[in-house]
Image (cartoon, rainbow, N blue to C red):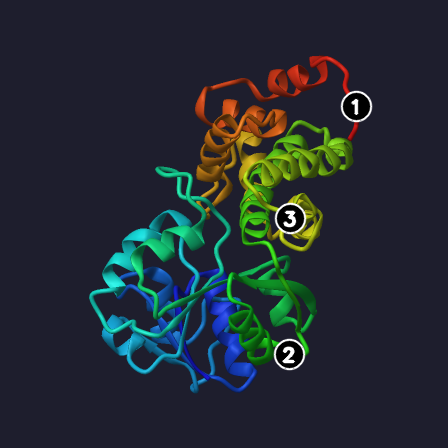
Amino acid sequence: MKITVVGCGRWGSCIAWYLDRNGHDVTVFGEEDAPTYVGFKENRTNGVVTFPESIHLTADLDDALNGAETVVISIPSQNLRAFMQTAKAHDIGNKTFVLCMKGIEVETGMRLSEVTAAEVDRSNHIAVWLGPGHVQDFYAGIPNCMVIDSSEDAVKCRLIDAFSGKLIRFYYGDDMIGNEIGAAAKNVIGIAAGLLDGLGLSTLKGALMSRGTREVARLIAAMGGNERSAYGLCHLGDYEATLFSPYSHNRAYGESLITGVPMTKLAEGHPTAAALHRLAAENGVEMPIIAAVYSILYEGAEPKAAVARLFERRQGQEF
């Protein structure tokens, strides 16, 4: 399959390496002045992933899209609409777009597949590739399980057949709402985990995992999805990689808010906290953990006090 990967950051570069390893014809598109693109162009590496010569690098979007059957996108989620608006000025007819980001558009509250659908036509197909795993682990040969979902059964079947390999066991998703909301929300829970680490309250991560999953499940159900998706690979299944791993940007970001150590890496959970706070209000769903993280990030709440307020809430049923 001729595939273009848009974005050569940490995850995009891993996807390109993985798909090339599986025998696909891979092109990687990056912004010409982006440090990651420059690094790959000059040295074929970002310090973690090294590209073989078989991967074609380009900063020319027309070159990148020309002939590609499938376009895999791995860029900051808040940049997706702008990219799609730029891309549709080129020939994107009949292409399949696979979204590998985990986020929600802040300005609209739209899921990323909805953002993409609004910018393409009926000849295009849209899928999402979600679940746990870190670049460092995959590149070291450590396997994991992930999920691919699409509103079109034939699309997800074709992608899973093409993308499956020894490093990734894919499962068929059947709930775009649940998988996208669950995947985005786990990044906010990751920030909460980092806050607990910074406060010396890491023992609360068990409760965070249980109660965080429950409130995300309620939101998924209220939005018309299947609440069981919160307990699948898109959300709960991604907790180890997000709440505990030293490679997790969101966990590290949450901890940095306590320690004061500068965090320069992208933490998708920051804008997603605002988007989820909005969706919870619009759908009448109580999400106390998301609300606590939102209050810290956007309202200046003191982290230790925000945690204390969670314990002061009136008692209720677990389920």
Which amino acid, mark 1?
Gln
Q: Position of residue 229 (x, y in %)?
A: 66, 49
Residue 198: in sight, yes or no?
yes
Report the disc number at residue 317. 1
Please report whichever mark, 1 or 3, sits nearer to the chain's N-terminal start.
3
Question: In what element is the residue under mark 1?
Answer: loop
- Three-letter amino acid code at disc 3? His
Q: Does residue 97 appear left or right of residue 194 in this picture?
A: left
Image point (26%, 64%), residue name: 87
Residue 64 position, x and y percent, is 30, 75
Residue 17 against residue 296 in the figure, above or below: below
Amino acid type, residue under disc 2 in the picture: Gly
Would you say 104 lies left or right of 135 here? left
Quadrant of the rendering where the C terminus is positioned: top right
Task: Judge whether residue 245 can be spotted in this image.
Answer: no
Q: Position of residue 19 (x, y in %)?
A: 52, 78
- Residue for point 70% across, 35% down: 214
Q: Nearer the viewer, residue 275 or 300?
A: 275
Q: Could you classify mark 1 by the number of other residues whose Cα lies within 10 Å: few (under 14), some (14-19), or many (20 or more)? A: few
Q: Earlier in the sequence, mark 2 or mark 1?
A: 2
Residue 51 in the figure: left or right of residue 238: left
| Residue topped by disc 3 | 235
Q: Nearer the viewer, residue 217 or 20?
A: 217
Q: Is residue 222 above or below residue 2?
A: above
Of the two numbered discs 3 and 2 on the same chain, state the one appearing first in sequence.
2
Foreground residue among 220 and 260: 220
Does dot 3 land on a helix, a strand or a loop? loop
| Residue receiving disc 2 | 165
> Please, what secondary structure does the residue beneath circle 2 have?
loop
Q: Which mark is residue 221?
A: none
